[in-house]
């Protein structure tokens, strides 16, 4: 029996399954990115229909998560991958959790928009829009780094998170000033702060995904590691 | 060769490894529970030293997460578990992520306490304390359900989360009243609201762990499933 051929065949099937999961996760990423862009457009254009659409579409994100999760467990059980193949499966299982949470955050922003009657000062709204643009860029970059398994690009995303935290901090301070100046603005400002916080948490999830990409490629778990140590790991690539 | 004996031996080693991971995760759960109790005690007694201790101890929680994660990947690669053994490994990998996030939330509550000069009205503080007690109870119950892999207990924790959401909602409304009445109270009230939100998110993570317990025992992924459907699954046990 030509076991060489058989092994190649099995490995070929495995590759096909991996490729299939990989394209599913990229489709999930694309959907989550669309949800985030839609909710930001809904905020900008005061488009309540679009906000409702984002809420309704969250179930699609959830279904992606459950399907990919199940498929990964099935592949691990059937193919019993080791080393880098197993690492990739674990990376995918973790990544979809973060993508699903980003979907939840887009949904909770949509809900905050529907509560909000949008009389907020332009300056706060502009800052929130600018933060939203940064976040979409960050998500796009981390999905791209994931697709190409590019550690350097992933690390750039990781560094970006500090900027997002500062933008959030700025919006909180600004909102606080308006709240202190006019107590009638408090409920609305709280909603804007909650939107800003949700965007900041999207940034955290992008950072997590960036860490998984580095783990997948280098085999090193860089969570809770200093920036200098991480850079040494990445420079080794 | 007595392969039966060999298999038994391998399976015995595997059981030992599983038991080891299981006790590690329970130790991690115990540490996270302690962190949560400490930060609530720090809030109650205005004990800044204890708040600092919680912040310093977070690294221990992070280390647990990384060690258990690595150990699970090692076991999957070496033992190539299938069916319920694999499900248990995936359950553990997911559970430690949620435990680590609960640790982060305890840390962020500690930071909010250090910012806060505690002139909040007693009624808000009492409500926050009551919510904290509920959350510690919820975490303890879900860790217990995890230790015994008890789906019915896990589902009770799941139902508990609605109560936590209502308590949070109540604290937000109450804080809002104080903020509207006296704008000088705004910064402090925002900190209290942020503590309440962190506690609410601890509840969400407990709910996630409860869902993993149900998945592990029944093989059914109950995330994003209606309460009626989940109850039918659990009644089948």
Image (spheres, coloured by chain):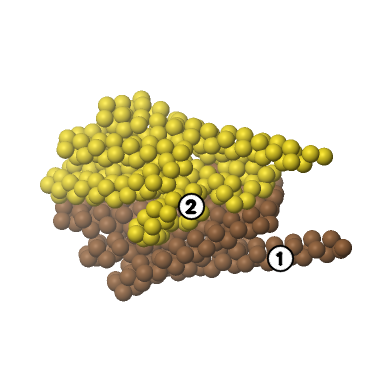
Chain colours: A brown, B yellow
Image position, residue A61 (x, y; %): 45, 65
Question: Would residue B177 be seen by someone viewing this image from the given angle?
Answer: yes
Going 49% across and 32% down the picture, which residue do you hit?
Answer: B27
Label 1 to label 2: alpha-carbon separation: 29 Å
Asked if residue A63 lies left or right of residue A221, the reply is: left
Look at discs 1 and 2 and give the one toward the viewer: 2
What chain is tagged by disc 1?
A
Determine whether the residue tagged by mark 2 lies in a helix, strand or loop: helix
Q: Name the foreground residue: A172 vs A194.
A: A194
What chain is tagged by disc 2?
B
Image position, residue A4 (x, y; %): 84, 61
Q: Name the foreground residue: A5 vs B63.
A: A5
Image position, residue A9 (x, y; %): 77, 65
| Residue indicated by mark 2 | B218
The residue positioned farthest toward the right in the image shown:
A1
Q: Quick check: do tags 1 and 2 share a chain? A: no
Going 57% across and 42% down the picture, which residue do you hit?
Answer: B69
Asked if residue A35 lies left or right of residue A30, the reply is: left
Asked if residue B158 lies left or right of residue B98, the reply is: left
Determine whether the residue tagged by mark 1 lies in a helix, strand or loop: helix
Q: Quadrant of residue B121?
A: top left
Going 34% across and 59% down the picture, which residue do you hit?
Answer: B228
Badge 1: residue crowd in 10 Å (few <14, some 14–19, many ≥20): few
| Residue indicated by mark 1 | A13
């Amino acid at each position: 029996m030509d076991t060489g051929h058989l092994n190649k065949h099995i490995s070929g099937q495995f590759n096909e399954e991996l490729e299939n999961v990989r394209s599913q996760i990229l489709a999930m990423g694309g959907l989550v990115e669309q949800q985030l862009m839609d909710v930001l457009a809904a905020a900008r254009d005061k488009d309540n229909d679009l906000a409702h659409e984002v809420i309704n579409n969250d179930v699609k994100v959830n279904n992606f998560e459950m399907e990919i999760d199940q498929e990964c467990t099935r592949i691990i059980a059937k193919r019993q991958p080791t080393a880098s193949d197993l690492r990739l499966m674990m990376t995918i299982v973790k990544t979809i959790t973060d993508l699903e949470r980003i979907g939840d955050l887009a949904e909770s922003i949509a809900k905050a928009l529907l509560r909000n009657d949008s009389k907020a000062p332009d300056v706060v709204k502009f800052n929130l829009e600018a933060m939203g643009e940064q976040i979409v860029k960050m998500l796009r970059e981390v999905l791209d780094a994931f697709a190409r398994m590019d550690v350097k690009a992933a690390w750039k995303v990781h560094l970006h998170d500090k900027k997002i935290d500062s933008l959030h901090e700025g919006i909180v301070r600004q909102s606080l000033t308006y709240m202190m100046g006019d107590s009638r603005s408090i409920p609305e400002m709280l909603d804007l702060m909650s939107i800003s916080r949700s965007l900041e948490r999207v940034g955290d999830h992008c950072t997590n995904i960036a860490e998984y990409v580095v783990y997948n490629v280098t085999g090193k778990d860089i969570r809770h590691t200093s920036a200098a140590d991480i850079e040494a790991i990445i420079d080794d690539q």
